[in-house]
Amino acid sequence: MPGNSGTQVRTFFRTAPFYYPEPPPVRHTLLTGGSMLAVNSGGGMKRFFVSMTLLIGVLVLLVPGPVRAQTSDSTPPPQHPTTHPAATHHTATHHAATHTTAHTRTVAHRHRRRPLTAHELARSHRLQRAFVASSQLRPMAQQLAQTPTPAAYSGVSSYAHSHTGEAAAAAWLALGHAYLLERKFPEAVSALRSAHLADATKAQPDGALADYSAYLTAQAFLQSNQLPQAEQVLNDYAGRYPDSIFVNSVPILRANLLVQEGDPQAALTTLNPHRQEPIAGHADFQLALAKAEALAGHTAEAQQLFEHVYLDYPLSIEAGVARSQLATNGVLATLPPDKRRAHADALYNAGHLADAEDEYRSLAGQSNIDEASRNALLAAAAECDWKLHRLSQTQLNALPDTNGEAGARRMYLLMELARDKGDNTTQQSIVTQMETRFPDSPWLAEALYSSGNMYLLLKDYPHAITYYGELATRFPTHKYGPSAHWRAGWLNYRLAQYAEAARLFDEQIHVYAGGKEIPDALYWRARIYEDQEHKPSAAATYYATILRVFPHYYYAMLAQDRLMQLGAVTPDSIADLDALHPVTIPELTDDVPEDDPHVVKARLLANAGLNEYIAPEIRASDGSDEWGAFAEAEIYASYGESWRAMRLLKRAIPFYTSAPIEAIPVAYWRILFPQMYWTDIKADAERNGLDPYMVASLIRQETEFNPAAISNKSAYGLMQLLPSVGRSLAKEEGIRHFQTTELLNPSTNIRLGTLYLKQTLEKFGGQPEYAFAAYNAGDDRVIDWQSIGNYHGIDEFVESIPFTETREYVQAILRNEQIYRELDKLTAQRAQR
């Protein structure tokens, strides 16, 4: 984000060794525990609606397993390759194929699948007609789904009134769904009834989306406490809509309805036949069963089920309901303390710090907790408070100073408070005390890592090396072990202590072969071989290993250049390097069955703006485990949500940065590396003397091509311009009466963003690495990092960037550029065939 020189925070170097950017803002629906949360992840809440009976059971189709967390769209960081060929890894830059050892790969484009039945084919044809008929509805329905303004409602309503049949039905469904989210139940019921009537005929009384209109109508009745009407809609739902994705959800919905009506026996009769089915493994089913048992007077069975939901589904909304019930019944305090502690730890590990803090303190207040456990719980609660920026020195001093893990955690937090104050003397004193009192405690490892980060930021490399090195020596298997070991090695390199750096790099490759730092260690060990030890054949071996194992990494591009400079050199054979293997690329296919009823229905749902149902609808298809993520991503990309499509494929195939271009179908690559707004990008890049691939790569890294992205620092649009920067650039461009919201216009944002990038490049002598770093962290920080001096090349500067986010940002843009070029080259070659 440009113009952000004062916003990076030291928490990058607290306890998380690597930073992965949050996804750009997009309004989406989270289905959790049968509930819907309509949120905007980047710019504040648009609508917030939680109901324990709304859309109950849809998660059965989304998330299998007994313990499930509420998840965001964020992409999880994939792992690096190890000596196990099936491992995966992350980031880099492509290289010429002359130095590549072929990856294990299978790319499938056509798959044999069972033929559709006559019934399925008829459904598919009808859904396809509805999809074609409602295609012009999509932009209006998507607008309503994203931003439910009166104008958006009016647009979809006008469409519904001016069309008939399937097109009108889709519009009415979009309206009903939106009203339901707004808790406008009478309007929702009316619109959904119109949806049902619009495409019903004598021959086919149920339309293409009749199962949706019926299910959502039942939800509206249930939410407005019109229970008989809801029950009437749900009666024989499975018989009327046997192919619906909601069939498995209806028993839960009916059971909740019957409980509300005061008929627990009927609720149990509804649920009992499904106890051995997969649906029973979900929290919403178990909670419905618990409520029915409780109402039936089966106290012991109900309590056991509430305990099960609370303890075994800690991150679900249902767990909160179960906890309230257990507390009301006075049995919460009787639960096994170790299980309650595990529940609190699950909340803590998931980042639910406020809830975890409440749970720790609640448990610590129980009379059946021994003193050691109570002290541990209070220390855990204190760390939650620290991470929530509300822990005071007084609160921390009040905790008992014990010789157990609670005491170690307390001292770690005292060290962090000292670091926050810039009190290096106290920080060093506390770590020294911890080394004596708690030599084997993981909290000493935390203190050592945080201290190393502290001195790294202070440019006090000898102190940083000491703390990192001690962590790696004392705690080699700790989660921060690989990172600390690498940083000790790298800082030795920066201090020209090459023999020690070489030793540590070799150790890194041998001990931490599966770590994220391996490409870095390979490259810089090769540089020592080349520059200090003058062993070109050994250097060539390391460079070639990077190209073989990490083909799309930043260091692969650099290794390629170094090999070209070395010329004709015969690489050595080194056992540790021979043991490294590239990731195995699993079978991928872009052969989506176009006539599959669920696939066609998913596309129809996109026309109606019912985005949260696209994934479960696709997953109901035969064989969707092979192509489902791609099919879903294609749908999002087709209506302009390239960022959502990209994030989906990043999660589905996190190994893509390890794959040669030819190892993955091109259609996947085009979603992962879109060229939206290409005309504007090319024109504005040329006007400012920029490479259009550079501009596209920067946009991909900044916002994943989300034109509506607004960061928590108020940076706007594709290229994330601050309003002040936008105003200044607009004035230079002669744009009169400029408004900040114009930065959300892709053309305007690209026009001003390319100008800003040009100016940043000029400010830093045309060196892209400096410019990208400044774009992310601010000019002042880059100037500060440059002032350290003694860099022997731009690669050394990049590796020395102390903010992991900025370092990976710079490397990723360079990688993106190379992949864009490779894709266009491949496309041109295929066009000539």
Image: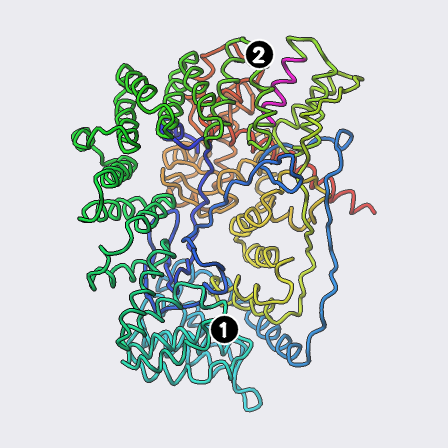
- Residue in the foreground of this view, choosing between 686 and 30: 30
Report the span colored magenta: 519-529
> Residue at label 1?
170
Badge 1: residue crowd in 10 Å (few <14, some 14–19, many ≥20): many
x, y (%) of residue 795? 58, 20
- Residue in the foreground of this view, choosing between 423 and 564: 423
Task: Answer above or below: position of 767 versus 606.
Answer: above
Residue 792 badge? 2
Task: Answer above or below: position of 774 versus 724.
Answer: above
Left or right side of 763 for 32: left
Q: Residue 416 appears in which quarter of the rendering?
A: top left
Secondary structure beneath dot 1 equals: helix
Task: Answer above or below: position of 139 versus 752.
Answer: below
Determine if the magenta segment contains residue 403. Answer: no
Q: Nearer the viewer, mark 2 or mark 1?
A: 2
Secondary structure mainly formed by the magenta segment = helix
User: Measuring 57% from the left and 23% from the top, which residue is drawn there?
Assistant: 508
